[in-house]
Amino acid sequence: MRNYFFVAFLVLTLEIYLSKAFWINPGYHKTYVVVWNELEGGQELKLHCKSGDDDLGLRVLKPDHGFKWKFRPNFWHTTQFYCSMQWGDGKIHRYDIYIWKRDYERCVHCQWIVKESGPCFFDPAAHAYDICYGWKS
């Protein structure tokens, strides 16, 4: 039983070390995400984003304002941030704003706008927010 706890401690220590140590895998760039409020009619956007490790708290964004955060994706390629958004009638809308498998290669500075119809991703090649998605059910 004592050996089990020692091995578990070593595995946990190694996982923390590898996920925090950029120099071990310099390919894991720091990622920046910004979410802009582009709702019609001057509505405020209530935005609450979190991952399995971090809760970024509730933010209230005025029209044309954004919320930005940064992080380094984890060693296991499972980093994911999901956001709940609310405005107007109070209905809660959800979207996975960052998923490692989808976003790691396509953005270092991941920019999104939120519209009533859903979030739109900034496509650097087109210089436009033209990759739009529907809300998660």
Image: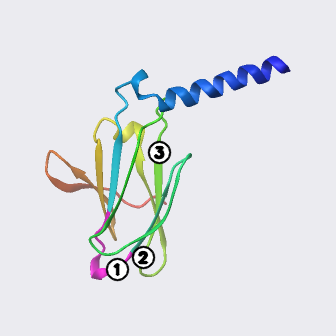
Q: Are marks 2 and 3 in contact (CB under 8 Å)?
A: no
Q: Pointer 2: residues within 10 angstroms few (<14), some, or many (20+)? A: some
Q: How many marks?
A: 3
Q: Is residue 70 visible?
A: yes
Write down the residue under mark 1.
43
Q: Reading the chain from its start, which is encountered first: label 1 or label 2?
A: 1
**Distance between the alpha carbons at the discs numbered 2 and 3:** 23 Å
Q: Pointer 1: residues within 10 angstroms few (<14), some, or many (20+)? A: some
The magenta span reads 36-44
Q: Amino acid at mark 2?
A: Trp
Q: Position of residue 20 (x, y in %)?
A: 49, 32
Q: Pointer 3: residues within 10 angstroms few (<14), some, or many (20+)? A: some
Q: Residue at x 43, y 37 (%)?
A: 73
Q: Residue at x 34, y 27 (%)?
A: 27
Q: Reading the chain from its start, which is encountered first: label 2 or label 3?
A: 3
Q: Amino acid at mark 3?
A: Gln
Q: Residue at x 48, y 78 (%)?
A: 90
Q: Is residue 76 visible?
A: no
For residue 132, which numbered disc appears in the image? Answer: none
The reply to whether the magenta stretch includes residue 50 is no
Q: Reading the chain from its start, which is encountered first: label 1 or label 3?
A: 1
Q: Does 25 sit above or below residue 20?
A: above
Write down the residue under mark 2.
87
Question: Which residue extends farthest left?
Answer: 126
Write down the residue under mark 3.
80
Query: Callout 3: helix, strand or loop?
Result: strand
